[in-house]
Amino acid sequence: MYDYIKGQLIELNPADVTVECSGIGYNILISLSTYSKLQKEKSECVKLFLYHYLREDDELFFGFFDKDERDVFIQLISVSGIGPNTARMMLSSMSADEIKVAIVSQDVNKIKGVKGIGLKTAQRVILELKDKISKDHGKEFAFDDGGMNTIRTEASGALILLGFSKPAVEKVLTSLFKENPDYSLEELIKKALKVL
């Protein structure tokens, strides 16, 4: 499988890009999230992580700004009824983190809110991916505080599940712990909610 492509950005559109690498122009389908990040970066040389979609009558490249987005895409297309274009639509409507939080918190309405996703498909996504994402979810959103305590990890997980972004949660919890490292879990979450 192709892992990534690095080359000159020839054309950037909301749904696809053309990247020239070694004299060959590759047309790569992207999500709106990747498009936004590429626009912000404004670099002529880009690196996109690839997913090579191959069927007997079709061959497409899907490009992602980071590996996390590609991993979510691969998990989504493993669900029956979710094809690559639907997965790309989901990643255009929500960030990879938002999709993971919606799946782990079993937010059917959020997933169903994506164009082309019905109730049964949304339920299937949650059913098939919840355990898989839950295993990685803690690792991804836990903070490395030298094993200081599990209260901070639990608080961060709860706040992220409530819909707050990882960087915002990390910043608030860091300042709260500087203020008082002996907060209980409940106190920590309540104080963080007032600030976030």
Image: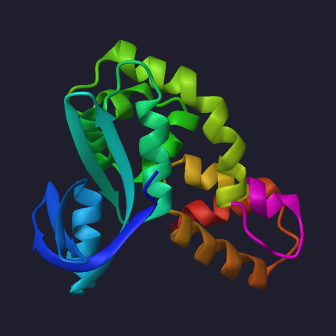
Residue 82: where, in percent of width, then height?
35, 26
Does residue 103 appear left or right of residue 121 in this picture? right
Q: Residue at x 32, y 27 (%)?
A: 112
On the question of residue 121 being in view, the answer is yes
**Of residues 180 and 22, which is closer to you in this image?**
22
Chain part drawn in magenta: 142-154
Residue in the image at 34% along x and 16% along y: 119
Q: Is residue 25 above or below residue 190?
A: below
Q: Nearer the viewer, residue 100 or 166?
A: 100
Provide residue 4's location: percent of width, then percent of height: 41, 65
Residue 141 place in picture, x, y as percent: 65, 59
Chief secondary structure of the magenta span? loop
Residue 87 sits above or below residue 176 on the image: above
Please give left or right for residue 76 compared with residue 42 in the image: right
When asked about the image quadrant of residue 159, the answer is: bottom right
Queried whether the magenta region covers residue 144, the answer comes back as yes
Kindly indicate the quadrant of the structure image that contains residue 66: bottom left
Of the pair 174 and 187, the residue shown nearer to us: 174
Give the residue at x 50% y 57%. 68
